[in-house]
Image: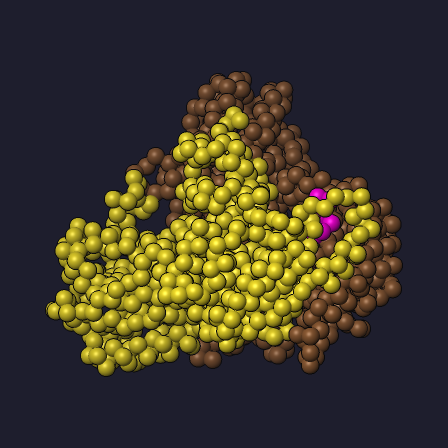
Chain colours: A brown, B yellow
Amino acid sequence: MKVALAQLNPTVGDIAANSAKIKHFIDEANRHQADLVVFPELALIGYPPKDLLLKPQFIDDNIAALKEIAGLCDRCAALVGFACRHTGKTGRALHNAAALLVQGQWADSYYKQLLPTYDVFDESRYFEPARGHQLVILGRERLGLTICEDIWQACEYSDRPLYDLKPLADLKDAGADLVINMSASPYVMGKHAFRCDLFSRQCRRYKLPLVYVNQVGGNDELIFDGASCAFDRDGELIAQGRDFEEDLLLIDLDRMHTARKETLREGIASVHAGLILGLRDYVDKCRFRSVVLGLSGGIDSAVTAVLAVEALGRERVFGVALPSRYSSEHSLNDARKLSDNLQIKFEVIAIEPAHKAMEAVLAEVFTGREPDVTEENIQARIRANILMALSNKFGHLLLTTGNKSELAVGYCTIYGDMAGGLAVISDVPKTMVYELAHYINRRGEVIPQSIIAKAPSAELKPNQTDQDSLPPYEQLDDILHRYVEQEQSYLQIVSAGFDKNTVERVICLVDRNEYKRKQAAPGLKVTSRAFGSGRRMPIAQNYQSFKPGFPQ
Amino acid sequence: MKVALAQLNPTVGDIAANSAKIKHFIDEANRHQADLVVFPELALIGYPPKDLLLKPQFIDDNIAALKEIAGLCDRCAALVGFACRHTGKTGRALHNAAALLVQGQWADSYYKQLLPTYDVFDESRYFEPARGHQLVILGRERLGLTICEDIWQACEYSDRPLYDLKPLADLKDAGADLVINMSASPYVMGKHAFRCDLFSRQCRRYKLPLVYVNQVGGNDELIFDGASCAFDRDGELIAQGRDFEEDLLLIDLDRMHTARKETLREGIASVHAGLILGLRDYVDKCRFRSVVLGLSGGIDSAVTAVLAVEALGRERVFGVALPSRYSSEHSLNDARKLSDNLQIKFEVIAIEPAHKAMEAVLAEVFTGREPDVTEENIQARIRANILMALSNKFGHLLLTTGNKSELAVGYCTIYGDMAGGLAVISDVPKTMVYELAHYINRRGEVIPQSIIAKAPSAELKPNQTDQDSLPPYEQLDDILHRYVEQEQSYLQIVSAGFDKNTVERVICLVDRNEYKRKQAAPGLKVTSRAFGSGRRMPIAQNYQSFKPGFPQ
């Protein structure tokens, strides 16, 4: 039997376009004489469809599309991910399902058993889990069908499994010859290596080969890396599809070891590729033709600009420098030099007249008050107003350029530099922004060296640098990683050797700035815990995280 | 046995302050010779605690506080809601639990069985459900313990129950004499009447009396109305606590019919009380001393200003008129008159100089382009910049004044009139804003009649009215109610008698403006489906909701 792994990039909710892609891949599979083509989880509607699933018409539409596709599955059978109505007497309205399409018919349906409801996942909001194994009989083959999370339950990685079902053990008992996994597993830096380790262990444990098909593409904050692959029953990797692009990977189950094996990106190269894909798909799936961004001459906007050019091409990127009275000459030069290197359209719009007018407008009501952060925010918000005006007038999507470190501690202005439709690097800590810059310059200068070398500054008052207000970024990022990604407590972080006052201050800043993040643009997730839908914090709350414990 | 229902208003995460409140209510219950005092769901940490629950230190702290409280429960026992660690071999880390504190000891714990994971609720993200009935033996009493959702499963209201457990039936079988329900059930207009109907039916079905204790207070977007109550085994209401404020309601189980019965607010009066509570608690729990808001002379900002004064007192509210060249004289007069009626601080800051400066700054890059919505948004964003500057400089919280109808169709400016820390009426449709205005004026003019009488206008270009761009609000609100709250399809709405093109246009506008709502301020929920955490839509998506179905 010859299996085709159709690693496709769907658009959420675009049933017509996704159907067309599925049909195209079925044709391709046929052309390669495959017996079965396997699509990712919920391929027909795109993952994650979120509350579109609550629209009954949407479910009807995805079923109508599925029936239409079934007619095309003649020689080659297909397993297509879709949302299926649940007909049981109790429970949620839907199953996260796979349809077996064979000989022109929708022959059967199979359901996901383990429904992730943590981090960015909300599957218990919509789906009822399957009970009992999901075995697909196709000719002489007994295929154990699993959907994403179904194969992730493994005792090596946690003290206590989240679920009390064991889909793989059940499939083994039911006599499966092979496990198929249809996934929509989002990218996180380092995750694919973890996946391969997990998959390999599962194959060895159950003495079963595994074929894994993952979605690819960016959908809002999530980037799906594809990287579909297969393992033999000894846990040996025998096929590896491309990462960060569509692919059709063919595996002859009788001659498994002849399959293609791509080399994948690792580390910062994968972050780079992931951000480019996430950015391109957000812009294209939102049907924008172009993007605009403010170029401050700093490293964050420089990296964002390069990513935009790599994602969209230089014709679709528009850079604007918005110097104020506090902007240094070198910043404007650096922004200009970057634009020259990238050959993008570049404008300089000085904000001084608008800045002066705002000061005049506020002069009376501010009488007798000392300057403070207010005056800094005013400048950032004038810039946002100008950038949004360009967005409104010319139809550009505004890209936000802030990094994760500053978003964490609130070193950013709400309705100012936080404004924009997509926050490209808002899950990239500042230290990793530098890594990205070095990676971007790996074959020669794209980002001017002076941008990388200078001390970071918001340039919102004279001679300002970030380090006036914040601990050094190496230290800050380490504390943030422990506090935000690892949920370490104040005491745990302090015992790791950090200064008490610094830890207290950083924790206070993170907690106090939840209100800003509530109104942040969607940001591309590349770490295990991004701000956004995977971190849901109350705003009006008063937990004293920065203290050793109760009683405090 | 004498039971005290301690309807308290906790602050999320503030374990020390909530403990103090719980201790105070235990003292009060003792003073009234109660045998048992019952607190709301998760009273010790406040509902909803969201991802604070993922912090192990937070769980430790709530357990330490519980142990301390136990020492005070001498004569009077207590049932206190808290987050308990789950010690089973599989499953999530926590239970949504109640501790029985008796004779100075933490005697036992009971767990919630039905975990709501829909709308604004995410309980499956954190909690493992209990298995088996939760019977509390206290002296001679056999108390059936339930937590919120546990008593909401009833066949009358849906074709298919969400859960396959039946906590009430199990408790009846186990010989319970009385059902206790500890809740954190958010306010929605009309919901308390529904609750009473449901509770009454459940009592009659199982021939059991019910004591229901609900949380009160605002926590971010959710308003909890309290309104704790009790029913006898015949489904008769025998006790009714206050709505929208703290209360201690005493019930002697041997003389049930002697308990206090408060009269509750209904309809628009309950919306009014709910918004006041939600606003006051958001401001106070975020520890702001005062609020600022823009007064346009329109009805939305007028209603918001009145609610703010009723919530906080006139000294804590600061109104600002920000007239532009398109503002009418009557608008400024109306704003001033409103401020006079409310006796609040009032400033006029004309935006013309800033507006002119922004035009000058953008003149070159806009050369040859016709004016469009860009120019309108610029004005709204200048206003936001000024209001945020006042917020930054003086420490006021900025209130957003937009209503649900305009937020639904995107008739609002992101980073402009959408800016603010709390959107007070963002779940109030425009037609209901008028109802609120009439209700506010029920005893005489607070909102000037001219504000209520005039045609709504954004005043962002000459002679503009809302109805230039939108269908009449009665029609718009009806379509929005069907589309947003009821998930009706295009065809269903059209068959209800609405014009095809209007329905198509409204649906398109709602779908296309998801990106704005993603960055909206938290808004107080008063309808069954508010924008915010209860409605999770993808942004980069392309479902054609405005068409009859697939194939389209």
The residue lying at 61 percent from left, 34 percent from top is: A8
The residue lying at 61 percent from left, 71 percent from top is: B347
Residue A499 visible in the current orientation:
yes
Considering only vertical position in the picture, is A217 above or below A319?
A: above
Q: Position of residue B344 (x, y in %)?
A: 52, 73
Task: Give the residues drawn in magenta, as a range.
Answer: A388-396
Considering only vertical position in the picture, is A39 above or below A404?
A: above
Considering only vertical position in the picture, is B78 above or below B174?
A: below
Quarter holding the N terminus of chain B is: bottom left
Q: Is residue B279 left or right of residue A396?
A: left
What type of secondary structure mainly makes up the magenta span?
Answer: helix
Q: Specify the quadrant of the image occupied by residue A480.
A: bottom right
Identify which residue, A487 or B119, lies in the foreground. Answer: B119
Q: Specify the quadrant of the image occupied by residue A171.
A: top left
Give yes or no for residue A389 being in the magenta stretch: yes
The residue lying at 52 percent from left, 51 percent from top is: B455
Q: Position of residue A125 (x, y in %)?
A: 43, 47
Q: Position of residue B188 (x, y in %)?
A: 37, 55
Residue B48 visible in the current orientation:
no
The residue lying at 63 percent from left, 20 percent from top is: A31
Considering only vertical position in the picture, is B542 above or below A367?
A: above
Q: Specify the quadrant of the image occupied by residue B186.
A: bottom left
Identify which residue, A351 or B534, lies in the foreground. Answer: A351
Q: Is residue B495 left or right of residue A379?
A: left
Identify which residue, B409 or B498, lies in the foreground. Answer: B498
Give yes or no for residue B436 being in the magenta stretch: no
Q: Position of residue A378 (x, y in %)?
A: 70, 66
In the picture as drawn, the residue positioned furthest to the left comes out as B254
Q: Total marks drawn? A: 0
